[in-house]
Amino acid sequence: MPSKKPLSALILASAMLSPLAMADIKVGVVTSSTGPIALVGIPQKNTVALLPDSAGGERIKYIPLDDGSDPTATVKAFKKLIDEEHVDAIIGPSGSGNAMGVIQFAAESGTPMLAPVGTAAVVLPMTEQKKWVFKTTQNDDLIAAALVDNMKARGVKTIGMIGTADPYGENWSKVMKGLTEKAGIKIVADEHFQRQDTSITGQSLKVLMANPDAVLIAAPGSSSVMPQTTLKDQGYAGQIYQTHGAALDPFLRLGGKAVEGTILAASLMLVLDEVPESPAKTIATDYVDRYTKIYGTAPATFGGNVYDAGLLLQNAIPTALKSGKPGTAEFRAALRTALEHTTEMPATQGVYNITPADHSGFDERGREMITVKNGGWALLK
């Protein structure tokens, strides 16, 4: 005669099979913690441990995957999360090109995608597919407008550009063309390169021959360094600007003296000790302190983009739960709608006001004018 299971074991087994136990909100996180985009992806992967573990009385389960910086692997990761894990939302991927290649899968499955990438092309122009995407970095035009204002104030009349041959660099060329025309600044050279290139001597020589007053480098992560060091090695003495894609400490270490004096507009996370008190500063300081305690080093702003994605979901989930249960299409649709109505929510990168037309939601509170001074970041005075 088979032995009877203890009552406690039966209760435990029943709980494991109950709908309540299976009701965790599941969030996929796709990062490039290996490969060419790793300087961006590593702090993003590390940040998963700091994301909110509950919202609206429900637990949040994160499922992290590494795409190795490979767009094909990004597609596989998204399909796995959507088709096999049945996630309620996805944070990621790390790269702009990788993100452009998976928007269709997020849209077709009705899964909100929070993209911590640089290019505004993931949300602009708004389309039926892109309405499922929310961008947790500042749009290019917000950053570019600050740079162009600085150029104009310094009397810059001509600029050269060197950018990556991908959605990030291409969108920056488009945005800068419109803003510089209005400011009376002429783009005299606009060169592009692949992130994996080991030399851009040809492109930099073309920029030098155009003799611009200033140069803007539009490249994310470690790819932002080589154009600047090459220009300096070739004798360029004008002002060099960078985008928020260069806003990470390895840029300082890899660039050394060649990046001294660089001007960029980027997150307040780079200069927390110098900015005035604000809700965003409080949140950013807490994030940096917690990250540093675990990993022994401060996070790059790219990690903050993933942290903010977690805060946005935490803020939206209670509202979405009124329309459906986790794991259902109704919940995912309600989550998308709730994200789209985020109002005055402070986070590490600034303050979010997301609308149906603006799925990034930053204003001037999402940027600071920064320079490289004595090998470190400093507010531009």
Image: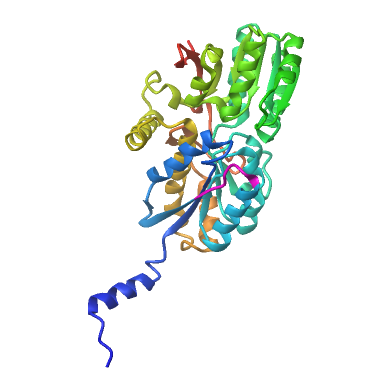
Image coordinates for residue 10, horizontal then vertical, percent: 29, 78
Does the magenta portion include 293? no
Q: Residue at x 52, y 12 (%)?
A: 257
Q: Position of residue 29 (x, y in %)?
A: 50, 48
Percent position of residue 90, x then y: 53, 50
Q: Is residue 36 above or below residue 145?
A: below
Give whichever of 286, 252 is nearer the camera: 252
The colour scheme is rainbow
Q: Residue at x 67, y 42 (%)?
A: 126
Indicate whether 377 appears above or below 71: above
Screen quadrant of the N terminus: bottom left
Classify 208 as above or below 251. above
In the picture provided, is 13 more to the left or to the right than 359? left
Specify whether residue 123 is in view. no
Q: Residue furthest bottom?
A: 1
Which quadrant of the structure image shows residue 230? Answer: top right
- The number of numbered badges drawn on the structure is 0
Residue at 55 percent across and 63 percent down: it is 84
- The residue located at (64%, 8%) in the rendering is 238
Would residue 280 be seen by someone viewing this image from the given angle? yes
Q: What stretch of residues is rendered in magenta?
A: 65-71
Locate residue 315 relative to residue 107 in the image: left or right: left
Determine the residue located farthest toward the front in the rendered image: 198
Q: Tell whether 118 sits left or right of 296.
A: right
**Percent coordinates x, y for residue 109 in the rendering:** 61, 58
Give the camera-side residue of 208 and 280: 208
